[in-house]
Image (cartoon, grey):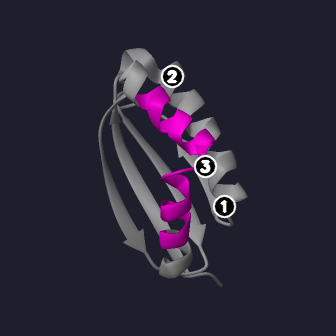
Amino acid sequence: MITIHLRYEIDADKIDDFREYGRRWVRLVNRFGGTHHGYFLPSEGDSDEAFALFTFDSLAAYEAYRTAAATDPECIEAFALARRTQCIRRYERRFLSPVFE
């Protein structure tokens, strides 16, 4: 099992655009066999930092999702939304191994 942690630097004036971007990806990741744990937007403190977490059964399953997402029309449109609105300034991706009870 692998969990992907995304840290975003966002444009705080475009948080509604980023929220829409996140809503789309939650559904898309789940459709491609992952489990999305949500997007976490700023409420207090830093107003330009947001996070997302999602899990796939394996790194191979995540790579299959990435390959499929590159040509999927809904995924392409979600990427286009971020580019069009410029709601994301930059992001970092980390791969984590979750520990559950």
Where disc 3 sits, the SS reads strand
The residue under label 1 is which amino acid type?
Answer: Phe
**Is residue 70 at least partly visible in the picture?**
yes
Q: Which residue is mark 1?
A: 32
Identify the mark nearer the N-term, 3 or 1.
1
Name the disc covering residue 38, or none.
3
Q: Nearer the viewer, mark 3 or mark 1?
A: 1
Range covered by the magenta-colored residues: 63-82
Q: Nearer the viewer, residue 47 or 13?
A: 13
The residue under label 2 is which amino acid type?
Answer: Asp
Q: How many marks?
A: 3
Using residue 75 as the reference point, say whether residue 82 is left or right of it: left
Residue at 35% from the left image edge and 23% from the top image edge: 86
Identify the mark nearer the N-term, 2 or 1.
2
> Considering only vertical position in the picture, is 32 above or below 63?
above
Where disc 1 sits, the SS reads loop
The image shows residue 5 at horizontal and vertical percentages of: 43, 60
The image shows residue 91 at horizontal and vertical percentages of: 31, 45
Using residue 52 as the reference point, say whether residue 46 is left or right of it: left
